[in-house]
C-alpha cells in the first residue's frame, strides 16, 4: 500500500483557527502529517498536483480534507465542487468545517458531495473535542479509499 | 244628436283627455322610456329617449331596440328575462348616443298585456347613473392608490426587516470566530502555563473564559432569533402533545436530580410549523425549569384553556415569578428580570418565542407574581385549533 504522507489537508484562511486546530490534533497525537492550505486556490493546487505542488502525485491524496467555507480567492464551495467533479479526486473524503450553520450552506455542501458538515463551536473545549473525534474517525476508524478508487475509468 | 252619439262623443273626449294627460307625463319624465313589441321593435319612446340616443322618435320607432346598446347580447338577455319573469329591476346597460358617447343606465322593465291578458309588449324605463358611476370610479381609483401605497410600504418594510436580519446574522456570525480564538488561547494559556501563573492571573483568565462563553451563547441565540425571522413557515397539522413530549425529552439533562411534578393537560392538533412550535415549548419549559430551581418541588403545568371564547395554550410554573410592573420588558431582546448570578440566560429566549408565535399570526402574553410563579399564554391564531380533529385522531398516533 502506498504510504499517504499527508493525512489531513486543513483548508483554512484564519491563522488563529489554523493554530487552534493544529494544537488540538497534535495534542491528541492523531495526525503525524497535516498540511495547511491558506486559500481555495492553494487547496486546489495541492490536490490537483499543480503549480507549487506539481511534484506531488494523485496517489498521495490526503486521508481527509477539512474545508472551511469562507476562503479568499476560490470559495470553499467551489473547492468542493472541483474536487467532487474530477474522478481523480472525487474519492477524497471532504468534511466541511465552518462557522456557518446556514441551512443553505449545509444543503449546498451535501449537494456537491461533501462527506460531512461540522460547525465550529465557540467554546474551545467543545471545539477540541470535536477535532479529536474527527481525527479519530477519519484516520483510525474509517477505511480510506484504495488506489483503485482514484483511477479514471 | 241622439243620446248614443252624445255618449260616445263624451267617452271619446274623456279617452282623448286621459291619453293627452298620460302622454304629457311620459314626455315630462327625465328617464328615457320606451315600449317594445314582442319582436323587439321599438313601438314608442319619449323625449328623454330622443335625447339619450340623439335620434328623433321617427327614427327610433320601428327599429330594433338592441341597436342602441353597447352590449346587445346583454340587452337581449334582459329583454328575454322580462318575458320569462314578467319584469326586471335595476338591470345595468349602456345606451350609445348617435355621436358615440355612452350613458350608463339602470333599467326597470315590465310586460304589458291586452284585455285578454296576452303580452303585447314591454315597457321599460332607464335611469341615468353616470354620476354614480363616476363617483364609484373615483372611489375605486382612490382605493387602488391606497392599496398600492400600502403594498409599497409593506414591501419597503419587509426589505428593511430583511436587511436588518441579514445584518444581525452576519454580525453574529462573524463574531463567533474571534470569540472562539479568545476562548481557545485563554484556555491554552491556562492549561499550559498554569504553574507559572499567580492565583489572580488564573482567576482573571477564567473570568475571560466565562465572558466569552456568555457572549458565545448570546451570539448563538441571536443567530437563532434571526434564523426564525427569516425562515419560511412549513405548516402541517401537528399534535401539540407530541411536540411537548419531545421538548420535555430534550430537557432531560436539565431535569436530573430535580423533583418535578408535571401536570400535562390535553392539547389540540393545530396547523403550524412543528419545528418552530417545538422551540416555543422548549424555551418556555426551559424557563419554567430554570425559575423553579429554588423550589424543593417544581410544579410545571401545561394545558389548554379558554379565554374570551378562544382556545389558549398555557405553561405555568411555581417558580420565582416576576413583578407585573416589568411585564412589558419580558419579551424584549436582551431584557432580563433577574440578576445573572441568580439565573443565567441571554435574554433572547422569550423574544424568540414571541417571534415564532407572531409568525404564526398568534399572540403570547404572561402573568406573574413575585415568588409565586409565572404563566405564559399563547394562541396560534392563523391556525385555528381544531378540537374536532384532536378527538378523532388517536392520541397515541401523535
Image (cartoon, coloured by chain):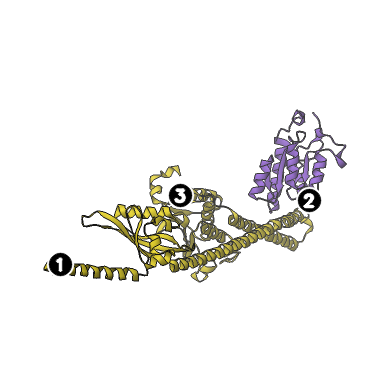
Q: Are marks 3 and 2 in contact (CB under 8 Å)?
A: no
Instruction: State the image quarter where residue B95 is shown.
Output: bottom left
Q: Which mark is residue B241?
A: 3
Q: Disc 2 marks which residue?
A: A72
Is B144 left, or right, of A29 in this rendering?
Answer: left
Q: Is mark 2 on a helix, strand or loop?
A: loop
Callouts 3 and 2 on one subunit: no
Return the chain for callout 1: B
Q: Which of marks 1 and 3 is nearer the N terminus?
A: 1
**A147 to B385, vertically: above or below:** above
Q: Is mark 1 on a helix, strand or loop?
A: helix
- Give the alpha-carbon distance from disc 1 to disc 3, as whole Å: 101 Å
**Which chain is in purple here?**
A
Q: Residue at x 70, y 35 (%)?
A: A142
**Which chain is in yellow here?**
B
- Give the alpha-carbon distance from disc 3 to disc 2, as whole Å: 48 Å
Q: Residues within 10 Å of mark 1 (few under 14, many from 20)?
A: few
Amino acid at each position: 500500500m502506498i504510504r499517504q504522507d499527508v493525512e489531513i489537508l486543513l483548508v483554512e484562511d484564519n491563522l488563529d483557527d489554523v493554530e487552534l486546530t493544529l494544537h488540538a490534533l497534535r495534542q491528541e497525537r492523531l495526525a503525524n502529517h497535516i498540511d495547511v492550505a491558506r486559500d481555495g486556490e492553494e487547496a486546489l493546487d495541492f490536490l490537483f498536483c499543480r503549480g507549487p505542488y506539481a511534484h506531488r502525485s494523485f496517489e498521495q491524496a490526503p486521508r481527509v480534507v477539512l474545508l472551511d467555507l469562507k476562503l479568499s480567492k476560490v470559495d470553499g464551495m467551489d473547492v468542493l465542487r472541483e474536487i467532487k467533479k474530477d474522478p481523480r479526486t472525487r474519492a477524497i473524503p471532504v468534511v466541511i468545517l465552518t462557522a456557518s450553520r446556514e441551512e443553505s450552506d449545509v444543503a449546498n455542501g451535501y449537494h456537491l458531495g461533501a462527506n460531512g458538515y461540522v460547525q465550529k463551536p465557540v467554546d474551545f473545549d467543545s471545539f477540541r473535542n470535536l477535532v479529536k473525534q474527527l481525527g479519530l474517525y477519519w484516520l483510525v476508524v474509517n477505511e480510506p479509499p484504495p488506489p483503485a478508487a482514484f483511477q479514471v475509468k | 244628436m241622439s243620446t248614443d252619439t252624445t255618449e260616445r262623443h263624451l267617452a271619446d273626449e274623456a279617452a282623448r283627455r286621459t291619453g293627452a294627460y298620460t302622454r304629457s307625463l311620459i314626455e315630462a319624465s327625465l328617464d328615457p322610456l320606451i315600449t317594445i313589441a314582442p319582436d323587439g321593435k321599438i313601438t314608442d319612446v319619449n323625449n328623454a329617449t330622443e335625447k339619450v340616443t340623439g335620434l328623433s322618435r321617427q327614427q327610433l320607432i320601428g327599429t330594433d331596440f338592441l341597436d342602441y346598446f353597447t352590449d346587445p347580447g346583454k340587452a337581449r338577455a334582459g329583454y328575454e328575462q322580462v318575458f320569462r319573469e314578467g319584469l326586471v329591476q335595476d338591470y345595468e346597460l349602456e345606451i350609445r348616443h348617435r355621436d358615440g358617447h355612452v350613458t350608463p343606465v339602470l333599467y326597470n322593465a315590465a310586460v304589458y298585456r291586452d284585455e285578454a291578458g296576452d303580452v303585447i309588449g314591454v315597457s321599460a324605463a332607464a335611469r341615468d347613473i353616470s354620476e354614480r358611476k363616476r363617483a364609484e370610479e373615483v372611489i375605486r381609483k382612490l382605493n387602488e392608490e391606497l392599496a398600492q401605497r400600502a403594498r409599497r410600504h409593506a414591501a419597503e418594510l419587509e426589505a428593511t426587516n430583511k436587511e436588518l436580519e441579514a445584518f444581525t446574522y452576519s454580525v453574529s456570525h462573524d463574531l463567533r470566530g474571534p470569540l472562539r480564538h479568545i476562548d481557545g488561547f485563554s484556555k491554552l494559556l491556562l492549561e499550559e502555563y498554569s504553574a507559572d501563573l499567580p492565583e489572580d492571573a488564573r482567576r482573571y483568565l477564567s473570568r475571560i473564559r466565562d465572558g466569552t462563553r456568555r457572549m458565545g451563547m448570546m451570539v448563538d441565540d441571536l443567530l437563532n432569533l434571526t434564523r426564525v425571522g427569516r425562515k419560511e413557515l412549513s405548516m402541517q397539522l401537528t399534535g401539540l402533545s407530541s411536540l411537548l413530549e419531545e421538548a420535555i425529552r430534550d430537557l432531560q439533562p436539565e431535569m436530573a436530580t430535580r423533583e418535578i411534578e408535571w401536570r400535562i393537560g390535553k392539547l389540540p392538533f393545530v396547523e403550524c410549523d412543528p419545528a418552530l412550535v417545538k422551540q416555543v415549548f422548549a424555551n418556555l419549559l426551559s424557563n419554567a425549569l430554570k425559575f423553579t430551581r429554588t423550589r424543593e418541588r417544581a410544579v410545571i403545568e401545561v394545558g389548554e384553556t379558554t379565554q374570551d371564547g378562544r382556545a389558549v395554550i398555557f405553561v405555568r410554573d411555581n417558580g420565582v415569578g416576576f413583578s407585573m410592573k416589568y411585564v412589558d420588558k419580558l419579551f424584549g431582546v436582551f431584557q432580563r428580570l433577574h440578576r445573572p448570578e441568580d439565573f443565567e440566560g441571554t435574554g433572547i429566549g422569550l423574544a424568540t418565542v414571541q417571534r415564532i408565535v407572531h409568525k404564526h399570526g398568534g399572540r403570547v402574553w404572561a402573568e406573574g407574581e413575585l415568588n409565586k410563579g409565572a404563566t405564559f399564554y399563547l394562541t396560534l391564531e392563523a391556525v385555528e385549533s381544531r378540537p374536532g380533529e384532536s378527538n378523532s385522531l388517536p392520541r397515541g398516533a401523535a
